[in-house]
Image (spheres, helix red, strand yellow):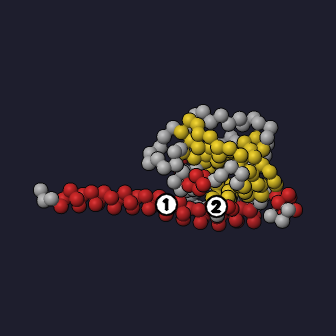
Amino acid sequence: MPRFVPSLAFALIGVILFGDGAYIHAKAWLAQVLLERAFDRSVATGQAVKPWSWADTWPVARIEVKRLHASATVLAGSSGQALAFGPGHVEQTVDAGERGVAVYSAHRDTHFRFLRDVTIGDEIDVTRSDGKMLRYRADRSSVVRFDQSGIDPTTDRYELVLSTCWPFDALTAGPERYLLHATLIETDSHARESGS
């Protein structure tokens, strides 16, 4: 067997893996463009707008961390299929701005990659599809097993949790999740009054 065959095989595998990784990031980017358009139409019309005709979900919120110039449009539900296109609003958790804990989840290497750079005290803006804007302040983070989050859905506070896989630089899925906890500090009426 010629000596170049193993090298050629490794090069081909590398190209395939690179292409697969590039495809995932390109799909995530394109999905966010389509989700942004659908979200803007949802806010304008007051109706849920699907981002593409065959979608089984729709955008429900936009998350922004302005200090980091980071933004992501959130889908209804957190199935694996939904998370392939954007962050998901975890089922059976309240909407942002309601009493309890609103939980949004996304992949660490695409839509929630910015979570590694969020610091305690950062402001997180959430705009719901009904146009209501809310501001949260990041107040702590934790690393937990996926089945032991410690989140109390019955709290009487107004909280937000952003969840992604941990550690940030891992190449394979694992049982740990990084949770960024935040507390509501402003609603849209207060933000308008303060000139934000």
Could you tell me if residue 11 is visible in this image? yes
Q: Say which mark, if any, is on residue 25.
A: 1
Query: Is 83 located above or below residue 40 in the figure?
Result: above
* Residue at the image point whose x is 71% and y is 62% from the top: 42
Q: Secondary structure at mark 1?
A: helix
CA separation in Å, label 1 and label 2: 19 Å
* Above or below for 163 versus 147: below
**Is residue 49 rendered to the left or right of residue 97?**
left
Residue at 68%, 36% (x, y): give it.
151
- Residue 194 is situated, as x and y percent measured from the top left of the image, at 85, 62
Up the image or down, 169 lies above or below 148; here it is below
The residue identified by callout 2 is 68
Q: Is residue 98 left or right of residue 172?
A: right
Q: Can you name the residue that lies furthest to the front here? A: 120
Q: Amino acid at mark 2?
A: Leu
Residue under the image location 68 percent in, 40 percent down: 92
Given residues 193 and 87, the one toward you in this image is 193
**Which is more N-terminal, label 2 or label 1?**
1
Q: Quick one: quadrant of the C terminus?
A: bottom right
